[in-house]
Amino acid sequence: MNEKDRNLAPNEPADRLAEVFNLVGPLYRRAQRKVEQDAPVEGLSVGVRAVLNMLCEHGPMTVPQMGRAQALSRQFVQRMINDAAARNLVESVPNPAHKRSSLIRLTEEGRAAIIAVIDRERAVLRQAGGDLSDTEIDTCIRVLSRLLRFLDHVDVDQEPLTE
């Protein structure tokens, strides 16, 4: 192995974690495309699906809470909420903790739509994960969770630097 190849060979944790990031991007984009291809039954975009899923898992939330939880800008989350509200999938309700920031919750129609999408996705994932052990999946979740926590301080609402 020459010097250049040795420098590129993944041999330390940072190199291996870089491999994880190199896989996560394409995986995420392909998963998005799959959702978009399969979601026409419910007509959900990936963004609307993400907020519906979050509301299904966590109950009513504010737009800023959803943005922080998903590392998305409040503006993007608000657009997704507006799209979902126009289709009667979510509704705003008063927030007893904050008068100016309403809680967003699923409507019955929204709950039915996201449950149908989740059920369909789980059927596909059963095929993908058939030969993976619980230990392997637990390890993957642990590594990705650790990387996410490491980047927790990144401000998703901050404008990117431009040259």
Image (spheres, rainbow, N blue to C red):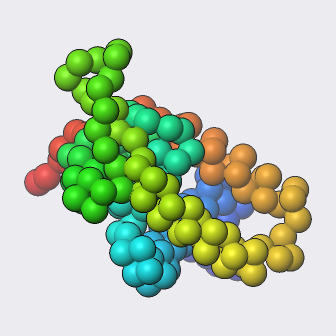
The one nearer the camera, 77 or 15, is: 77
Say which residue appears at 49% left-offset and 55% top-offset.
Answer: 111
Say which residue appears at 35% left-offset and 15% top-offset.
Answer: 97
The one nearer the camera, 158 or 132, is: 132
Q: Image check: 38 left or right of 2?
A: left
Q: Position of residue 161 (x, y in %)?
A: 18, 47
**On the image, which quarter does residue 46 sit in?**
bottom left
Q: Residue extending furthest left?
A: 163
Q: Image check: 91 left or right of 51?
A: left
The count of marks equals 0
* Quarter of the figure with the C terminus: bottom left
Q: Residue extending furthest front?
A: 108
- Does the rendering let one see residue 70? no
Q: Image check: 77 left or right of 44?
A: left
Q: Position of residue 82 (x, y in %)?
A: 22, 53
The one nearer the camera, 5 or 161, is: 161
Say which residue appears at 86% left-offset and 76% top-offset.
Answer: 131
- Does the rendering let one see residue 135? yes
Q: Residue extending furthest top?
A: 97
Q: Position of residue 37 (x, y in %)?
A: 44, 84
Q: Position of residue 20 (x, y in %)?
A: 61, 62
The one nearer the camera, 56 or 107, is: 107
Using the image, determine if residue 71 lies above or below residue 123: above
Using the image, determine if residue 23 lies above or below residue 49: below
